[in-house]
Image: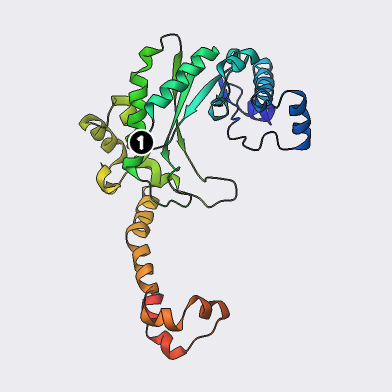
Amino acid sequence: MVSQVMDCHPDARWFHMGADEVRGLGESQDSKNWLHSNKGDVGKMFLNHAVSLARFITERRSGVRVILWDDMLRKISPATIKESGLQDLASPTIWNYLKKMDTDGIGTLISRYHEAGFKGVWFASAFKGGTGIDQRWTPLDYHLQNHLSWIKVMNSMTKYPSITLHGILLTGWQRFEHHTVLCELLPVGIPSLAMCLQSLKHGAFDEKAKMEAHHILGCNIKVEKDICEGSGAFSGSQIYHMVLYIHTNLQKEVEALMKHYHIKGGFSRYHRKYNFANSRIIEFFQDQLNK
């Protein structure tokens, strides 16, 4: 799989190998047998695979630099990581998508990875997704606060002069898991993306950042209202406004309709499931339903 991706991107200088959220690691019989012979060290099992894969990537193409998510590394001691040699092959991406982020906790992770011998780290934020598994509308203030927290962490990097910040990945989730529904569509999240990028550029979402975002988008971001006011000139703006209508009007209209006296009594979920009802009762709400 890695070889196929590398073949598709012959000029790539970075390769993100993932390696996150392996919560079921060590549960198969083969894994249990391995753990039995290695003092039950799941962290070492993870590192063996991560090092093997990172080495494969770097040997296959000279000069490629490897990235991996850091959540599985958080519970492994710096000494164990250093012993594995992973710090010479890859850089961890510290991710946090929360509105109220524990910036001191992020600092502790940076210190741990410095102790483990990593020369650099990446950060990862989110401009959409991460707030609800079926989220329809991007909450602007939530994602703005996440990025302002990351800016605070970036400003504190002077405390770690021997570890380099390579950059920040702005993730935009399409869904939470395989086979779950979509969260916000990309056009819905584009104003948030512009807001977050301008905040990172200027160090805050100040007036200059707002003006630049307005110029790019063709609409004015109102964080407190969770909307971008104006017609919008960005690609996908029509979808943005269609979903906005669903979010602000259609859903409320549907919810109000479903509370209709005759729907609750004569066209309930049970009636609809078995396809029967009194036609006289249906006449009381048919026009609203058609609308």
Give the image location of residue 258, x and y in percent: 40, 73
Quadrant of the frame with the N terminus: top right
**Residue 119 showing in the rendered view:** no
Position of residue 37 in the picture relative to residue 25 (left or right):
right
State the residue lying farthest toward the top.
Answer: 162
Mark 1 Cα within 10 Å, few/some/many (few <14, many 20+)?
few
Give the image location of residue 233, x and y in percent: 32, 43
State the residue lying farthest toward the left.
Answer: 207
Position of residue 143 in the picture relative to residue 129 (left or right):
left
Find numbered disc 1 in the image and state the secondary structure of the residue it sits on.
loop
What residue is drawn where x is 50% and y is 25%? 93
**Residue 137 showing in the rendered view:** yes
- The residue that disc 1 covers is 100
Give the image location of residue 37, x and y in percent: 77, 24
Give the image location of residue 86, x and y in percent: 61, 17
Identify the colour scheme used.
Answer: rainbow
Of 39 and 172, the residue lying toward us: 39
Whether residue 27 is situated above or below residue 179 in the rendered picture: above
Of 252 and 47, the residue lying toward us: 47
Whether residue 236 is situated above or below residue 158 in the rendered picture: below
Position of residue 178 in the picture relative to residue 220 (left or right):
right
Amino acid on which disc 1 is placed: Lys
What residue is drawn where x is 32% and y is 58%? 248
Of 216 and 16, the residue lying toward us: 16
